[in-house]
Amino acid sequence: MTSFFLNKKKLPLLLTIIAILMFGFGFALVPVYTLLCKATGINGKTGGPTQLGLLEEIDNTRWVTIQFIATNNANLNWAFYPKTTSIKLHPGENTLIYYYAENNSGKAMTVQAIPSVTPGKAAKYVKKTECFCFTQQNFKIGEKRDMPVLFHVDANLPKEINTLSLSYTLFNADKYKKAATSEKQGHL
Amino acid sequence: MNSIEHAVDQHAPYNSQGFFSKVTRWIFTTNHKDIGTLYLWLSLIMFFVGGAMALLIRAELFQPGARIISPEIFNQMTTFHGLIMVFGVIMPAMVGLANWQIPMMIGAPDMALPRLNNWSFWILPFAFALLVSTLFMSGPAPNFGWTFYAPLSTTYGPKSTDFMIFSIHLLGLSSILGAINIIATIFNLRAPGMTFMKMPIFVWSWLITAFLLLAVMPVLAGVVTMMLADRHFGTSFFNAAGGGDPILFQHVFWFFGHPEVYILIMPAFGVMSEVIPTFSRKKIFGYKFMIYAISVIAFLSLLVWAHHMFTSGIPLVSELFFMYATMLIAVPTGVKIFNWVATIYKGSVTFETPMLFAIAFLFLFTLGGFSGLMLSIVPADYQYQDTYFVVAHFHYVLIPGSVYAIMAAIYYWLPKWTGHRYNERLGQWHFWLTVISTNLTFFPMHFLGLAGMPRRIPDYALQFADFNMIATIGAFIFGFSQLLFLINIVRTVRGKGPHVSNQVWEGAHGLEWTLPSPPPYHTFSSPPTIDECK
Ligand SMILES: [Cu+2]
């Protein structure tokens, strides 16, 4: 190695390779960050669809309060709010709640809701079977929709957590349209 | 590398007659002294450009409710002031010093890759032309602060942001090429007998800085590339709507950003370790520990980036880790400060201008270090975050740290480079005006920050008026006293001062002082013998 470093032709080459590798390292931080967030619940990211909590036992000994929050990103001119603002349930119990959304923007739009759970370490215990955040949503002008969230809180939720909030931020995703979108009319 | 021999035989100093040959001499030069000079002049010009922008900012903040510049221009000025001072002033100045000094200090005939060296420099004027051109475009120039956080710079960034992105690519390329060159020079071109543990600390500090540059400048290039992709190619690295995360930007940016501040300060440590022993007429105290300390600081600097993100919602464990890791850096830094003080202790000290700047460095950089320690405390940071306390902190480490060190280095080596003594009286005036006005400008900002005045806002509440007025007065004194520096340099370069001996300073040690003043265009074409200098 020492001789490599002292080789007049090879050293600049080696250093160039280091620089290129570090350029790649910068990009490698992206998947590493995503994995870390999934594993530790940083930023309150919740996971993808899970099975209905039928097999799980319900922890009748305690209650968890779940608060629902809705935020419009930037200047999104929509009505967007949870129809239930807060519920109390036992860990393991399945619940269905609805968020209301109305496209007041004056044009057809595709939106994406991004969920976040606080406290962050509770995120991985929020198990969603169905959620409007799993896909992008296409709305016509003035369209109104009730959008479902079917979920349960895992019975393994740490004992010290008795309140958590599930928040959704609605983003304009016109620029990021994906193939799998939903136009499903929820109940109204 | 036969390009070295090329450099030696082809590029004898032109007896440049006429404008054209003068221009081509500087454009095509591969001589380390020429390129060092070019870097230093560029830095000096940009210092006045970035400084003028700072004065516009301070003029706007002279009184509450002032409307000297519009808030839009104010935002652009804070962005440009930061970018120019970091990438256009301190970095080029340090690279310029490296170009001049490293070959002369290790007994090398030139840099290892002289043509690459020419490229590294000549990329810069184009990069800055691109950056500054955005100020003259019809839309707004970049206006989101020098940290260009997403989504301000992606979703909401003005069109001109793309010019900034490309400019940063070029700046990064220039720094990486420079770093490769410096490492190659230090590894391969040391004179026989110049072992690593005999190298001057300035050379050591630049070697470690170059490795740090190599580690983080590509990451900066990566992050601006991601920005570009988000803006134009439909990706969403930093956009939650498409599955990305704006916090990720901060992680990647500060993975570069924190080591960057050490890139700005470590060559300054090197300069201090040359200047202080010379004017104390003693050897540096704890040579080995100085080198270990720089290495430890460089290593730790890669592990503390999230202390810039304490309030961004990162988990408690990470906050604790980054808090303690940050505090740990105070240990090697303390070792360095201790060793410099111990070098001065019982020395026969004289107070020429370089030494004055070095002593001011010791006091004021340490002060900046302490406010940094305060900021590293997570619960306290929740109060200080985004206030003028942060502004006070980083100006205390960057001005008395890097800028004073650069000034000390110029006063210290300019007689060697030009063969003439600078005007000592003018130098002392420059020093005292600079050091007084630095404190007048930035000391009140501590209190403004603690009282809650937010950064980057063109106006403020009435209770902050007095301190802001003092800061503005200080800033203008600082700005105009730099003209003394300019005058002194120009006078010396044009041969106004008395001739100096090879030795220049009686207490100076090192190979560069064995050369004539000014040194001939090519030095150490045959390697020197080392013992006579140590
Ligand atoms: Cu930092």
Image (spheres, rainbow, N blue to C red):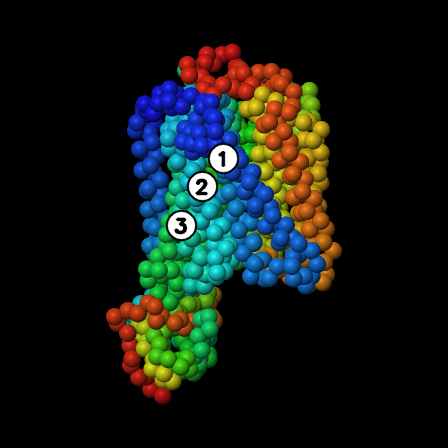
Query: Could you tell me the amino acid type at mark 1?
Result: Tyr
Residue that appears at 42% across and 68% down: A116
Q: Residues within 10 Å of mark 2 (few under 14, many from 20)?
A: many
Q: Disc 2: which chain?
A: B
Mark pair 1, 3: CA separation: 21 Å
Residue beneath disc 1: B39
Could you tell which of marks 1 and 2 lies nearer the N-terminus? 1
Rendered image quadrant of residue B420: top right
Q: Which of the labelled discs sits on residue B166, or is there none?
A: 3
State the residue at coordinates (41%, 77%).
A89
Q: To which chain does the residue with label 3 belong?
A: B
Discs 3, 2: same chain: yes
What is the chain identity of the residue bearing mark 1?
Answer: B
In the image, is B258 to the left or to the right of A29? right
Q: Position of residue A97 (x, y in %)?
A: 38, 80
Q: Is mark 2 within 8 Å of ligand 1?
A: no
